[in-house]
Amino acid sequence: MYQIKGKIDTSNAAEFEKEIMKELPKEIDASQLNYISSAGLRVLLKLTKAVGDVTVNNVCSDVYEIFDVTGFTEILNVKKALREIDISKLQMIGRGGNGAVYRIDEETIVKVFYDGRTQDYVQKSRANSQTAFLHDIPCAISYDVVKAGDCFGVVYELLNVNTLGRTIHKDPDKAEYWAEKAAKLLKKLHSTEFEDGVYGQAYESVINWIDTVKDKIPAEDAERIKNAVNKLAVRRNTFVHEDFHSNNIMVQGDDLLLIDVDDACVGDPAVDLAGMFTTHDITSSSDETSMWLLGMNASESKRYWTRFKEVYFEGMDEKEVSALSFRMRFFGTIKFLYGILRTDRELAVDKDTLSRQIMGGLKQMMDAVGM
């Protein structure tokens, strides 16, 4: 990566221009840049006109402010140097499919995304949270992106919070109470309208699950499943969280707050229910697995999920419940297949055998509805 150092101003801008226009880099490391004047910015503008999009990485706060005030954050892809945190001594308070949550101090927590999630993905997560917040979605607003080893994280200011799963595990007698609150919250989310184009459609995520593992299943099966998803999925502009489980929901006092809006979308509410079906009905049969996934044991998970469905489906007619439940099970089984084929964890059963059994179940469901 092309590196720029020290100060760039009128005294050395001409030399800087000569060097950088010879190399024509599209990525620049600015970790050792202390100052840049308008003369230096004009050189970067000339570079942008020559090569197209230019990314300037690892910009310190003072230099970032120069880029921001002059409007160059709109012209270049300028990325701040990130604060480093050591999570080895922090208390983990929850984990999900995308990352783990740690307590930094009494006022702040950090969600560290698993290795492989890029800085751009994490920045997208922040943007999704801000957009959701502006639409009255009860989510925590992040105020910093950090690095933890080779991984990226998002810091949230949350006082005296714990995950919903651990809150239930601490006081199992309130499992039904929290289930009611969570179900009512999800119904509210599923009735919150967004403008066209703000988020993608939820069914596209289900299609992506299959595309991600399509090299591990027969091509004709992958196409059949995707065609069924396209035909079954409901298209609308109401909010879908896509990862609404008890380690992504924080309890603050008597309120529930979402901290994981990475994959927010709109559309079929069955996509949210599918994720819950996968964790509560399929994968949480043992206490060990349930604690790892949800922060509560298998018995608590069953109590929570039973009451959750009762409250969520309340007021719907029988036909609506039947259709939504079918899509929940179908999409949830697809998500289970996706998870099994992607995981590096050792399983108690042979992965190939299990994936064939899951595929057989998907085919039975599609046969049942003529797809």
Image (tube, helix red, strand yellow):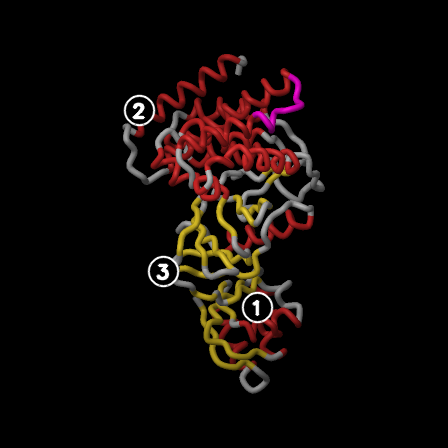
From the viewer's perspective, tell me whether residue 346 is left or right of residue 211: left
Whether residue 312 appears in magenta in the rendering, the answer is yes
Amino acid marked by disc 2: Thr
**Which numbered marker is on residue 89?**
3
Q: Which residue is mark 2?
A: 353
* Label pair 1/2, CB-CB below 8 angstroms: no
| Magenta segment boundaries in residue numbering | 310-317
Count of labels in the image: 3
Identified at 37% across, 33% down, the residue is 341
| Residue nearest the viewer, comparing 218 with 134 | 134
Whether residue 134 appears in magenta in the rendering, the answer is no
Q: Secondary structure at mark 3?
A: loop
| Residue nearest the viewer, comparing 25 with 248 | 248
* Label pair 3/2, CB-CB below 8 angstroms: no
Question: Does residue 80 sit above or below 276 in this rendering?
Answer: below
Picture quarter with the N terminus: bottom left
Q: CA distance from mark 3 to mark 2?
A: 39 Å
Identified at 67% across, 42% down, the residue is 197
Q: State which tag comes first along the sequence, 3 or 2.
A: 3
Q: CA distance from mark 3 to mark 1?
A: 44 Å
Q: State which tag comes first along the sequence, 3 or 1.
A: 1
Question: Does residue 306 sit above or below 295 in this rendering?
Answer: above
Between disc 1 and disc 2, the foreground one is 2
Amino acid marked by disc 3: Lys
Instruction: Tell me where residue 127 appears, x and y as whole percent.
Output: 60, 53
Question: Does residue 145 sit above or below 294 in this rendering?
Answer: below
From the viewer's perspective, tell me whether residue 238 is left or right of residue 7: right
Q: Which residue is mark 1?
A: 47
Amino acid marked by disc 1: Leu
Instruction: Tell me where residue 22 appears, x and y as whole percent.
Output: 49, 71
* Label pair 3/1, CB-CB below 8 angstroms: no
